[in-house]
Image (tube, grey):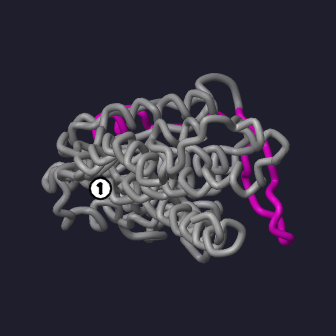
Amino acid sequence: MIEWWDNIIFAETWVLWFLTAIPAYAILIYYLGGRGRPALTLSSFHFLSGIRVPAKVKWRSVLYLLRFLIVILLITAFARPQSKTGFKRKKGEGIDIMLVLDISQSMDAQDFKPSRMEAAKMQAMHFVDQRPDDRIGVCVFSGEAFTVCPLTSDHEALKMLITNIESNQGELEQGTAIGMGLAKGVERIKESKAKSKIVVLITDGSNNKGTIQPLDAGRIAKTFGIKTYIIGLGATQGKVLSPTSQNPDGSYVMQYQDVDIDESTLMEIAQTTGGKYFRASDTRNLENIYEEINKLEKTEFDKNGTEERQEEFLPFLLAALILVLGEFILRYTTFDSLT
């Protein structure tokens, strides 16, 4: 209750000045009620010593107390008390982001827990949560590319779609078409009117499919002013347990293989577009990379934001009405013969 009251401000503070009239009102009631002058002067009250004062007389001051409270509550209600519910930032020109995710068979490798694919999806959703004011979309690629979700502000729907992404999704051609994936991301974001447009591409391999080469896709991105951040997934040393083929029942044949990421090409693409290349060797490292991208690409807002407040006069008004009803009932029932 105290914390709630600390959060209250009054939109019409001038109305509160009427509270200063309460003491004068109390004095007026006191004298008009006959408490300030005697109605009858007696030389002695000894003969009244055995008479008990009726309870009604003792408690009739309750009526005056109720009236004081009613006046205080009404003045408070008319002053329009409001509670803070948040801060509404005036959005300036925001950022549009396309996440481009490699879903080739190798993304089920287990150097990340439980796999590269699941780690990439988990961190992508966390990244979406960190960007509540930006539009974000998702494309995927293996041997070819397609759009899972265009740019949207509905982040809950977006995260649901990310959750359902799987390696070798649908009938996509097998392979790793990095150039096609980047080009698809550029296609989905190039017409954006946002101040800043970026593509975050996640892959664990080298380009071996597609009609568009990665460096050509990078040049296309640069032409449209699209900055590209690229994350290479894979352990930096040793062999990794990876799927090499698929059984008839859908399960994978797993073997230890070397990690093969064309880092020089990915780095050149990022530099060409004004972005940056990162190497993620484990889940924690991937999380840190997303945090760095999040810091590098801050959404700007108008500093002249507005504080959002909710009207709170109703509880005071209802309390006053309840007391008015209570005072009315008491005045014409219990204290009817005294007032």
Residue 266 image point, x, y percent: 37, 39
Q: Residue at x 55, y 34 (%)?
A: 286
Residue 200 against residue 163 in the figure, above or below: above
In the rendered structure, the answer to whether residue 111 lies left or right of residue 161 reads right
Q: Residue at x 21, y 49 (%)?
A: 196
Q: Which residues are magenta?
A: 240-269
User: Relative to the observer, which residue lies in front, 161 or 21?
Assistant: 21
Residue 339 image point, x, y percent: 57, 65
Report the residue that reaches farthest toward the left. 223
Residue 107 against residue 241 in the figure, above or below: below
Instruction: Give the amino acid type for the residue marked by disc 1 in the picture.
Output: Asp
Q: Residues within 10 Å of mark 1 (few under 14, many from 20)?
A: many
Q: Is residue 251 on the magenta stretch?
A: yes
Q: Is residue 193 on the magenta stretch?
A: no
Residue 293, picture quadrant = top left
Residue 114 image point, x, y percent: 75, 43
Q: Residue at x 64, y 50 (%)?
A: 117
Q: Which residue is mark 1?
A: 96
User: Relative to the observer, which residue lies in front, 174 or 165?
Assistant: 165
In the rendered structure, the answer to whether residue 311 lies left or right of residue 234 reads left
- Image quadrant holding the N terminus, namely top right
Residue 240 against residue 96 in the figure, above or below: above
Residue 306 image point, x, y percent: 26, 49
